[in-house]
């Protein structure tokens, strides 16, 4: 009997050794911070002046480069490419909205055709945390946690946020009440948060359009504050090996406030000096605010964590048809402007490629394949991107050889989340939450 049991154990071990389910993930830790719209034209000089100490600390010990991107540089499209390594034709996200049987709606997580990095890692027993990423509502069922982002375009806000009482906003669903409490607390602190960008503007400052763009910017800042606080809270509650956090305030501030930062970029602009004095520091203040948040997340991470900071595109002055310059003076859609890329941590080589015209630069397509490699997983040949091996030291690469590529990870239908009629109605109801935000910011009932 003992011999039979022994032989049975040997057979099970042999079967396990022959398991063809694919390579298993190796132990690793990655913190990925996405900063929409960050450009080296602004971040570089600010780093050198000591205004972005946390980003500079990462750059000083790690890898710095422009991040190649593509056009049209629409945020939901590029951030989905960053999360999948695939083209927009492959992942199916081509705009902010699309027509459905229910009318024109924001693009939702179910509309993505392929698996994202959090799916690929989670399905291979890597715990993941995703916070604020574009097009993640309804929250996907992940191996870890997800705080989803939903755009409420009817309220005039194109960046996503989290809202009080919104269903399917967080996974696990049992954390919903805690998220609601966090959102409500940050709404109450909204005026204090806004002062980080605007200081103490005098009551009634600005034209009607200036009041609107200030509101846009403050609302985006509040959303990012919610996401950063959620990321810190959730990762303390459930530590994960891969944490990805998105923030949009640099992009929003750059769209709305460029003319005040660089009033001479367009000869057509005639910006009063009083407006430059009042609003000229908003964009740098947004960078400084994000830098502080980067520092908070890095401080919370383990010392052996690979830190990645990336933006989807750069920025410049832009005259946009059908919009006044007072409404929008910065842009990126009509020019191919690279983003930023900074990496530091285990295996990262020290290099600065910003002025190296001969260097092979990383691309938004390469980030998912590269993260997969860090976890010992293969690139799929149906990905547009490749492992950016130039990121790593020769010693680390010798110890972590590339895993043979596979054809695809899409060997079964991608899981989606069913949405009820009541939940669709709740999306429209998020406008009520926006009204509460306007009150908290002082825009309804006087300021």
Image: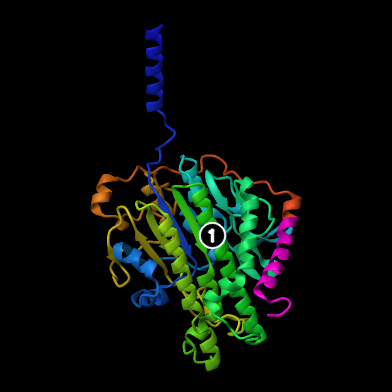
Nearer the observer, 298 or 359? 298
Residue drawn where x is 49% and y is 41% of the image: 123
Nearer the observer, 119 or 223? 223
Farthest top residue in view? 1
Question: Quick one: quadrant of the C terminus?
Answer: bottom right
Asked if residue 86 can be seen in this view, the reply is: no
The span shown in magenta is 425-447
Q: Which secondary structure dominates the residues rendered in magenta?
A: helix
Relative vertical location of residue 301 with respect to residue 331 in this rendering, above or below: above
Q: Secondary structure at mark 1?
A: helix
Q: Is residue 417 magenta?
A: no
x then y, percent, for residue 177: 65, 51
| Tally of numbered tags | 1
Nearer the observer, 45 or 67? 45
Nearer the observer, 200 or 89? 200
Relative vertical location of residue 378 with respect to residue 196 in this rendering, above or below: above
Residue hosting label 1: 229
Q: Is residue 431 magenta?
A: yes
- In the picture, measured across the screen, residue 436 lies left or right of residue 247, that is right
């Amino acid at each position: 009997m003992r011999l039979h049991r022994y032989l049975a154990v040997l057979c099970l071990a042999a079967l396990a050794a022959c398991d063809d389910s694919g390579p298993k993930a190796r132990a690793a830790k990655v913190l990925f911070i996405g900063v929409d719209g960050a450009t080296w034209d602004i971040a570089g000089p600010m780093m050198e002046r000591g205004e972005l100490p946390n980003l500079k600390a990462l750059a000083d010990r790690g890898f710095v480069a422009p991040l190649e991107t593509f056009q049209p540089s629409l945020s939901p499209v590029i951030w989905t490419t960053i999360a999948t390594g695939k083209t927009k034709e492959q992942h199916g996200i081509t705009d902010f909205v699309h027509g459905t049987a229910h009318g024109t709606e924001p693009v939702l997580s179910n509309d993505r055709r392929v698996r994202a990095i959090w799916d690929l890692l989670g399905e291979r027993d890597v715990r993941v945390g995703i916070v604020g990423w574009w097009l993640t509502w309804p929250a996907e069922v992940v191996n870890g946690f997800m705080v989803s982002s939903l755009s409420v375009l009817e309220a005039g806000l194109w960046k996503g946020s989290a809202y009080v009482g919104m269903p399917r906003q967080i996974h696990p669903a049992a954390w919903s009440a805690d998220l609601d409490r966090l959102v409500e607390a940050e709404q109450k602190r909204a005026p204090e948060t806004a002062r980080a960008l605007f200081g103490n503007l005098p009551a009634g400052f600005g034209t009607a359009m200036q009041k609107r763009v200030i509101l846009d910017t403050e609302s985006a800042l509040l959303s990012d504050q919610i996401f950063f606080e959620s990321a810190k809270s959730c990762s303390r509650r459930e530590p994960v090996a891969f944490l990805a956090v998105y923030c949009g305030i640099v992009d929003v501030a750059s769209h709305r406030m460029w003319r005040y930062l660089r009033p001479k970029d367009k000869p057509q602009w005639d910006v009063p000096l009083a407006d430059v004095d009042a609003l000229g520091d908003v964009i740098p203040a947004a960078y400084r605010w994000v830098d502080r948040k980067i520092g908070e997340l890095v401080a919370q991470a383990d010392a052996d964590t690979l830190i990645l900071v990336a933006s989807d595109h750069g920025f410049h002055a832009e005259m946009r048809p059908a919009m006044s310059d007072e409404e929008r003076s910065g842009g990126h859609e009509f020019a191919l402007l690279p983003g930023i890329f900074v990496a530091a941590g285990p295996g990262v080589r020290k290099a600065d490629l910003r002025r190296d015209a001969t260097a092979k630069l990383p691309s938004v397509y390469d980030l998912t394949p590269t993260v997969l490699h860090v976890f010992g997983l293969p690139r799929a040949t149906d990905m547009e991107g490749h492992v950016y091996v130039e990121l790593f030291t020769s010693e680390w690469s010798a110890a972590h050889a590339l895993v043979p590529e596979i054809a695809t990870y899409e060997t079964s239908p991608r899981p989606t989340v069913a949405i009820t009629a009541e939940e669709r109605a709740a999306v429209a109801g998020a406008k009520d939450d926006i009204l509460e935000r306007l009150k908290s910011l002082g825009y309804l009932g006087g300021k």
